[in-house]
Image (spheres, rainbow, N blue to C red):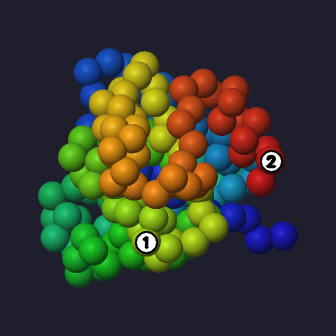
Amino acid sequence: MVKKNICVFCGASSGSSPDFITLAEKIGKMIGENNFNLIYGAGSTGLMGACAKSAQQSGAKVFGVMPNFLARVEKPLDGINTRFTTTMRSRKAIMYKKAFLFIILPGGIGTLDECVEVLTLIQLKQIKEKKIIIFNYKNYWNFLIKLLDKMKKEKFMNDNFYSDLIELNELNKLKTLLKSF
């Protein structure tokens, strides 16, 4: 049986609380223990590195995708299958294609960019039959959820927009959802 790839977008930084790293580790472990592989941005630091290391230790194959210019600034994680690209755009295209599901964890502007681009491509039907989970840990993504609700209310988004978007904030609910795939 071929394992499916889950793409996780999250911060290359650790954030303001050790709880963020713990969350990333738990989700990485959940990915591996539920017989999935991980595809992510290839970084070795922050939430990215924590999630990847935990997924790998829990049996997942880990695939990293990193632009060459970023590899000169951020060290890719050792011991994973890393693919290097020339641009951020080509990096994201590979990740979008290989993943069957996206999970958004806390992160910075890069994570926000990746989340919004996936949502846009789903709405434009360029990404089809793939779900995106915004893991709203400690209400981190509340501002984004409220903004999306406002866009829908003001008729700037389709009524069926939320059919592929799942907001979760509890690990046990994520575990149950992953077991359903």
- Dot 2 and dot 1 residues touching (CB under 8 Å): no
Q: Is residue 153 above or below residue 56?
A: above
Q: Is residue 26 above or below residue 117?
A: above
Comparing labels 2 and 1, the label whose residue is closer to the camera: 1
For label 1, the residue is 124
Q: Check disc 2: other Cα within 10 Å, few if <14, some if 14-19, many if 20+.
A: few
Q: Residue at x 31, y 78 (%)?
A: 90
Whole-percent x, y for residue 125 in the image: 50, 73
Secondary structure beneath dot 1 equals loop
The front one of 120 and 73 is 120
Q: Which mark is residue 31?
A: none
Whole-percent x, y for residue 17 in the image: 32, 18
Secondary structure beneath dot 2 equals loop
Which quadrant of the rendered structure holds the N terminus?
Answer: bottom right
Q: Is residue 38 above or below residue 85?
A: above
Q: Residue at x 37, y 20 (%)?
A: 18
Q: Does residue 73 show up?
A: yes
Query: Amino acid under label 1?
Result: Leu
Q: Quadrant of residue 50?
A: top left
Q: Check disc 1: other Cα within 10 Å, few if <14, some if 14-19, many if 20+.
A: few
Q: Residue furthest right?
A: 1
Whole-percent x, y for residue 124 in the image: 43, 72
The front one of 2 and 101 is 101
For label 2, the residue is 180
Which quadrant of the rendered structure holds the C terminus?
Answer: bottom right
Specify which label sits upstream in the sequence, 2 or 1: 1
Give left or right: position of 102 versus 140: right
Q: Quadrant of residue 40?
A: bottom left
Query: Amino acid under label 2?
Result: Ser
Whole-percent x, y for residue 131 in the image: 59, 56
The CA span between labels 2 and 1 is 26 Å
